[in-house]
Image: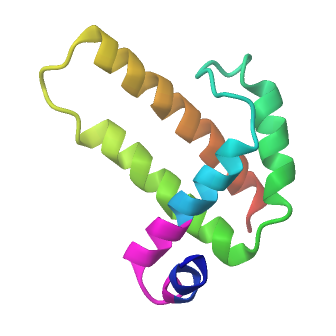
Amino acid sequence: MLMITYFLSFFSQKARLKLGEQVWNELDSQLPEAVGVIEDDKPRMEQFSKLLDNLSRHKKRALRECLEEQIHYLKYSAPDLITWQEEEFERKWLQIFNEHLRILKSKTP
């Protein structure tokens, strides 16, 4: 299934997002748990940076699109009325995705 998604992702944005999600899940499983605080996530970011070195340009592109999609969703798709716990959760993941995207952008031309 991964091979089919990989092949289709050259042509389809939807397939690229799916591949990006698969790449994210694979990398995330190899990293320490994300905290959502820049200083506390430093070891995670260092490991993430090293893992990016082993990814193909195509997988990096798919991951980038996936992270950008997640960030966009968190910024613009939240309902107007949410609890403080939901807002805190969204801010945490927005921070996590933004930091990973920043590292990814610094590693890709």
Please give the name of the residue rendered at 38% of the width and 27% of the height, measured from the top-left corner.
90
Please give the name of the residue rendered at 56% of the width and 68% of the height, measured from the top-left corner.
62
Q: Which residue lies furthest to the front in this view?
A: 1
11 w.r.t. 45: above or below: below
For the residue pair 7 and 77, the one nearer the viewer reads as 7
- Position of 68 with respect to 105 (left or right) is left
19 w.r.t. 71: above or below: below
What colour scheme governs how the chains and residues are painted in the rendered image of this protein? Answer: rainbow
x, y percent for residue 82: 19, 19
Residue range of the region highlighted in magenta in the rendering: 8-19
| Image quadrant where residue 33 sits | top right
Please give the name of the residue rendered at 46% of the width and 67% of the height, measured from the top-left corner.
18
- Position of 17 with respect to 85 (left or right) is right
In the rendered image, residue 11 lying in the magenta stretch gets the answer yes
Q: Main secondary structure of the magenta part?
A: helix
In the rendered image, residue 18 lying in the magenta stretch gets the answer yes
Q: Which residue lies furthest to the left in this view?
A: 81
x, y percent for residue 60: 67, 66
Counting labels gives 0
Quarter containing the C terminus = bottom right
x, y percent for residue 32: 74, 30
Please give the name of the residue rendered at 68% of the width and 22% of the height, measured from the top-left corner.
38
93 w.r.t. 48: above or below: above
- Position of 48 with respect to 12 (left or right) is right
x, y percent for residue 107: 78, 58
